[in-house]
Amino acid sequence: MTKPELLAPGGSLEKLKTAIDFGADAVYVGGEAYSLRVAAENFSLEEMYEGVEYAHQRGKKVYLTANILPHNNDIAEFESFVQSIRGVGFDAVLVADLGMFDILQKTAPELPIHISTQANNVNYQSATKWYELGAKRVVLAREMSLAEIEEIRAKTPAELELEAFVHGAMCISYSGRCLLSNYMTCRDANQGACAHPCRWNYSLMEETRPGEYMPVFENERGTFIFNSKDLCMIEHIPELVKSGISSFKLEGRVKTSYYLATVVKAYREEIDRYVENPENYEFDKNQLSELCKVSHRPYYTGFYFGKPDEKAQVYTDSSYIRDYDLIGMVTAYDAKTKTVTITQRNRFFAGDELEIVEPKKPYLTLIVTEMKNENDEPIEVANHAEMTVKFRSEEEISVGAMVRKRRA
C-alpha cells in the first residue's frame, strides 16, 4: 500500500507552519499574484523562502498555486513572476491554463507542474494528455465519484499522481468555474476574488412588478438555494486509499490556524492508523467530533458516492456552525512551576474549562483555577486581545498548541 500524501492549505506563513507542525506532508500556498485566493494573506517572496525552508527542514513539501484563469494582461507578467520564484525551492507549481503551463515549462523546466482542479479534469484521456505534456500530477475535479477515480487510476500511467479534495467548502459551480460573483459584484471568482453570492438569501421578482419581492422559502427564514454543505471524507479513508488517490487535499487557505490544526490532526491520525493496520482498522468516531469543533457547515460526502441530491444543500442559513472558540496560542511552558503562557485570542474567565490541542496527543481538558497577566498579577478575566495570560497545567504543553473553549 502506498501511503497517500496529506496536503494542507497555507494561507499565510503562520498557517504553513501550523499545518506542518500538526502533521501535513505538504502545503500549498499562494503568492501575491496568480493565486486563486486574494482573500488569503498569501506570501511575499521573503515569506516563500522562509516557508519552504521550514518545510524542507522537516522533510515536508511546499507547492505554489498559480491557477487563475488568465487574461492577456495576466500572461504578460507571468514569465517574470516565474523567474522570481525559481530559486525558492518549491516542490511543484499548480497551473490551470495551457498557456501558463507552456511558459512555466520553458522558463523553469526544473520545476514539477501540477494541473489544478480549475482545469476540470474529469476523465482519463485528459489526465493522460497532461502527463504526456509533462505534468507530474493532476488535481481531479470535485465532481468525481470514487468509481470514476478508480477508472482514471487504472487507465493512466502509474507515474502520474492523482490529487483530490477530501475536506472543506464545496463550490456550487463546476470546480469553481463561476460567473455569478463576476456578474453580481464585478469580482471574478476565476481571478481569486469570489464574493460567494452562492451563500446569499434569494427572492424572486417578476419583471412587470418591480420592487415586489416574492420569497423563495422552505420556511419563514427563506432559503439559500445555492448553499452547499461542506465536504468531509474522514469516515472513508479506506475507500479513498483504495481508489488510487495519491494526495488527500484539504480546502481552506482563508480558514484560521485553529481550523487548520484541528483538521490536519484528525486526518493525519486516521490515515496513519489505517495504513499501519488496514485489516483491523475501524474509524475513530472521536475524529468526526473533533471536526465538528471547528467552524463548518453541515458535512456530506460530495460526489464520491454519487451525484448529490437535495440533501447536499443548506436551505435555512448561510452561517457556519461555531460551537468552540479559539482562546489562545501557547507560547511557553515552565516545567518547574507547571505554568502555561498563552497569547489570548478570545475572552475567557478563571473557572472556565479549556481544551488544549497539540500534535500527536489526545486533547487535554483542564479547568483554569487561577490565572495571571504578564506581570504575574492575578486576574479573573482575560479580555484584551493579544494579552499574555498564565495558568497552571500539571501536564506539559508544547509551544504552538491551540487552546479552545466550548461556547456557552
Image (cartoon, rainbow, N blue to C red):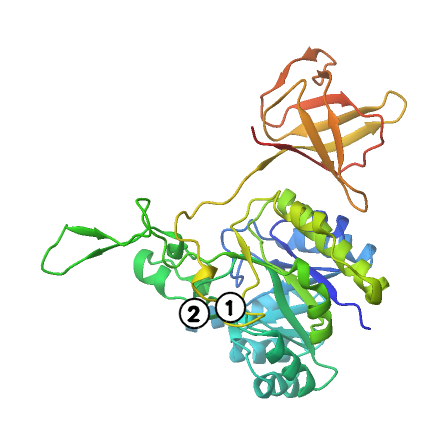
- Give the x, y percent position of residue 44: 61, 52
Q: Is residue 13 visible?
A: no
Q: Residue at x 64, y 84 (%)?
A: 151
Residue 53, picture quadrant: bottom right
Horizontally, is 401 left or right of 107 in the view? right
Image location (x, y in percent) of residue 89: 73, 64
Q: Residue at x 81, y 36 (%)?
A: 398
Residue 403 position (above or below residue 33): above
**Residue 362, image quadrant:** top right
Residue 48 location in percent, x, y? 67, 55
Q: Nearer the viewer, residue 353 or 264?
A: 353
Q: Is residue 141 left or right of residue 262?
A: left
Which quadrant: the C terminus? Answer: top right
374 relative to 35, above or below: above
Q: Nearer the viewer, residue 382 or 68?
A: 382
The numbered disc on residue 73 is 2
Q: Residue at x 64, y 73 (%)?
A: 114
Q: Residue 197 lies in what quarter of the image? A: bottom left
**Is residue 377 shown to the viewer in this render?**
yes
Name the quadrant of the N terminus: bottom right
| Above-or-below relation of 187 to 407 | below
Give amino acid for label 2: Asn
- Residue for badge 1: 77
C-beta proximity under 8 Å, tags 2 and 1: yes
Q: Residue furthest top?
A: 377
User: As shown in the figure, which amino acid type bears the numbered disc 1?
Assistant: Glu
